[in-house]
Image: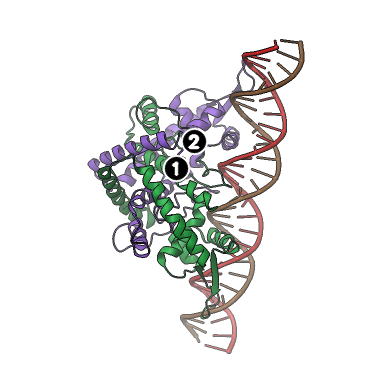
Chain colours: A purple, B green, C red, D brown
Amino acid sequence: MTAGSGGAGATDGAVGRTVTGTGSPDGVPVGPPPPVDGGDTVAKVVRQWRVVHPELDTGPMEIIGRVNRCAALLQQAEDAPLRRAGLTRPEFDVLGTLRRTGHELTPSEIARETFSSGAAVTKRLKQLTERGLVERRGDDRDRRVAHVRLTDAGRELVDTIIPEQLGYESAVLSGLDAEGQRALAALLGGLLIQLEGRLGSSHL
Amino acid sequence: MTAGSGGAGATDGAVGRTVTGTGSPDGVPVGPPPPVDGGDTVAKVVRQWRVVHPELDTGPMEIIGRVNRCAALLQQAEDAPLRRAGLTRPEFDVLGTLRRTGHELTPSEIARETFSSGAAVTKRLKQLTERGLVERRGDDRDRRVAHVRLTDAGRELVDTIIPEQLGYESAVLSGLDAEGQRALAALLGGLLIQLEGRLGSSHL
DNA sequence: GCGAAGTGTTTTACTTGTGAAACACCTGTT
DNA sequence: AACAGGTGTTTCACAAGTAAAACACTTCGC
């Protein structure tokens, strides 16, 4: 959070946390961004910090704050097409995971793949099963484990939504030219590899 | 979410939503990232989609998925120093906002600055007041409005945490060289300006 | 001045997620 | 064969957010 500490979202805070009901992601109502004089909202926050703490290196804020703020705004935008399909993003993530892997998955595998807790997956599967988008069957070797797969309806839903969603996202990113997009993806990829190695594996 | 749709977090899903208790951000337990062969976890998800839907342009996933995944991991990392101080990030965002603006703010101003709902701010202020980190006083012109300011203790807490947090973040980002960090901050800033203009102001 | 409409803040009912405990089941050891 | 310990999944109690309604107060138009 420090990256802009002060304005949760303003800097790196409000990335969007919980999604309640059909509303906007938690912590990310992302109200109308107040028109800012120079640069983005993160730049404004950084300037404020520089005034009260000139000795601090605000460099990390410029990246982390922006990553978080972008994520918050993108998530909200992305949610629109999903909402039309009556799905929350976490729910869609479950369906998408099943679709892209192409085979059945156990609840634990879905949790891992989806970066969510087992309990959350249990709840989502319950709902998706009730809606007929997903089916479960027990393993016959090991009766503890379940195998989950998409129903035909679930598969069709994913296949309908995915192109819409990608088109939507493409439009959202269109402010950046192709070269900028390529560069950004590469830099983020590099950062992500570091983060996944460093933060994923415990310490630091 | 489409950006990697399928694995909530894997692509752009699990950015981290709600933070419950002292645990990890909601939707972002960010379990041990499974060691991935080539590239980051997003690259793996993109490859999977390409197999089942070769006709789709997966470009947006490479950016949006990574932004979201980075945000999830960074948020978790950033939370560590805050947790030691017994604060959640949204709480710290309130304190930080008061600190960096340098003057009293009304609850609505805090909500705007913090990109959170008024109701959420009410709850946080209640807690922060109980802990003696923040004080309120009523406006004498307009008795509806309240003015919130940091107590000495609150101010000291912020000033203690901020350098720790920035140092921490700096370490987290150290995998990227100075030039990469500069470039990344600039690209994200450009994207953010687009997003704040486009997504903030209504449509699309 | 007085009521209607508007704004700032809090309350309410509900949703979703979490961590830990509870279950259910497997497996290796003795 | 039985049990200790481990793993997959679900349940439980609770935290924190949201949208909308409720309050409290101000201000505008007449």
Q: Is residue B151 left or right of residue A170?
A: right
Amino acid at pointer 1? Ala
Name the chain letter of the residue that bears numbered label 2: A
Badge 2: few (under 14), some or many (20 or more) residues near its Cα, within 10 Å?
many
Point out residue A118 in the picture as x, y percentages from the top left corner: 57, 34
Q: For the point 29% across and 37% down, which residue is it? A: A186
Q: Is residue B72 left or right of residue B146?
A: left
Point out residue A83 in the picture as x, y percentages from the top left corner: 48, 45
Foreground: B17 or A152? B17
- Circle 1 residue: B72
Name the chain letter of the residue that bears numbered label 1: B
**Do the dots labelled 1 and 2 sit on one chain?**
no
CA–CA distance in space, label 1 to label 2 = 10 Å
Q: Is residue A112 left or right of residue C23?
A: left
Amino acid at pointer 2? Phe
Kindly identify which numbered label has been placed on residue A115.
2
Instruction: Please determine whether, in this image, residue B97 is positioned above or below residue B54.
Output: below
Residues under numbered marks 1 and 2 in contact, where contact means CB atoms less than 8 Å apart = yes
